[in-house]
Amino acid sequence: MTENPVTLTLIGGPTAIIEYAGVRLLTDPTFDAPRSYEGGIALHKLSGPALGADQVGEIDAVLLSHDQHPDNLDEAGRAFLPRAGAVLSTPEAAARVEGVTGLAPWQTHGVGGVAVTAVPALHGPEGAEELSGTVTGFVLSAPGEPVVYVSGDNASVEVVTAIAERIGRIHIAVLFAGAANVGRFGDADLTLNARTAVAAARELGDAVIVPVHAEGWHHFSETRERLVREFGYAGLADRLRVPEAGIPLAL
């Protein structure tokens, strides 16, 4: 395997730069300052990005879990999209946002020498798609490189299990955690919580776990500190790598 590490730089919330096999990828662009987003369900952003849109440098592709919620694609993030070499997301996002390439589950798109494969994600409990909409995760692979899984806004451990069974060994898993919950499905969360993140980690073998989308928004119902404790109590602390916003983390 290559000696060049995968590097992740957390910008805030779900937004991170992933440097992998010679390409620079950006997950779910959110660059707005703290503010509230009104609508059917109001969302409240509590902290701004560690890096502004003009500070992230050249991006070969955006990996967009979905376009319909401002905590995954805000106004400044939407304005950033045309600057990326490609924007990969769901087919539904491609129908709504100009320039987006839509990928159905298990469909692969090449970015440089990297194969980006769309994988299933479930944004809430079973049947959530009708209200939450379709979302996607991604798997990155390249010859001689570790396999990287980016969960997107997925709440289902069963989905993680299915991905691991189909893909095989996953070396690094970037899990969207934080137990996002706006009350739409009662106590059922929209993303992984501390307990289900531990369960997902167990389904992922010995993969290094990197939590993102776990701070910066009012509707995240658990703290990152709880996630760290849960992994510690489960005996999995050695697999958890918690990024510090704005600081590159070699994986």
Image: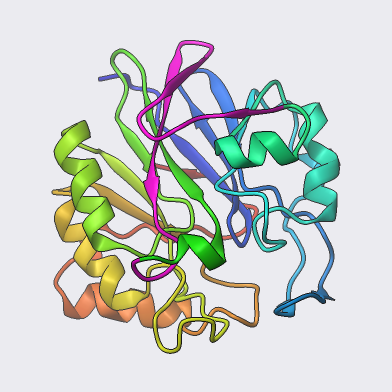
Which residue is painted at 51% across and 43% down in the image? 8
**Colour mode of the rendering:** rainbow
Region of the chain picked out in magenta, as a range = 100-126
Measured along the vertical axis of the image, is residue 239 above or below residue 190? above
Q: Quadrant of the C terminus?
A: top left
Residue 140 picture location, percent across and down: 39, 29
Q: Quadrant of the N terminus?
A: top left
Measured along the vertical axis of the image, is residue 34 above or below residue 134? below
Nearer to the camera, 57 or 190: 190
Which residue is painted at 24% across and 68% down in the image? 198
Residue 219 picture location, percent across and down: 60, 81
Residue 83 picture location, percent across and down: 81, 28
Which residue is painted at 23% across and 75% down in the image? 232
Measured along the vertical axis of the image, is residue 130 above or below residue 54? below
Nearer to the camera, 157 or 234: 157
Task: Locate residue 155: give its quadrant.
Answer: bottom left
Asked whether residue 104 is drawn in magenta, I would say yes
Q: Is residue 52 visible?
A: no
Asked whether residue 78 is drawn in magenta, I would say no
Residue 68 picture location, percent across and down: 67, 56
Which residue is painted at 55% across and 78% down in the image? 220
Instruction: Say left or right for 22 vs 199.
Output: right
Task: Locate residue 218: give its quadrant.
Answer: bottom right
Q: How many numbered marks have been drawn onto this rendered protein structure?
A: 0
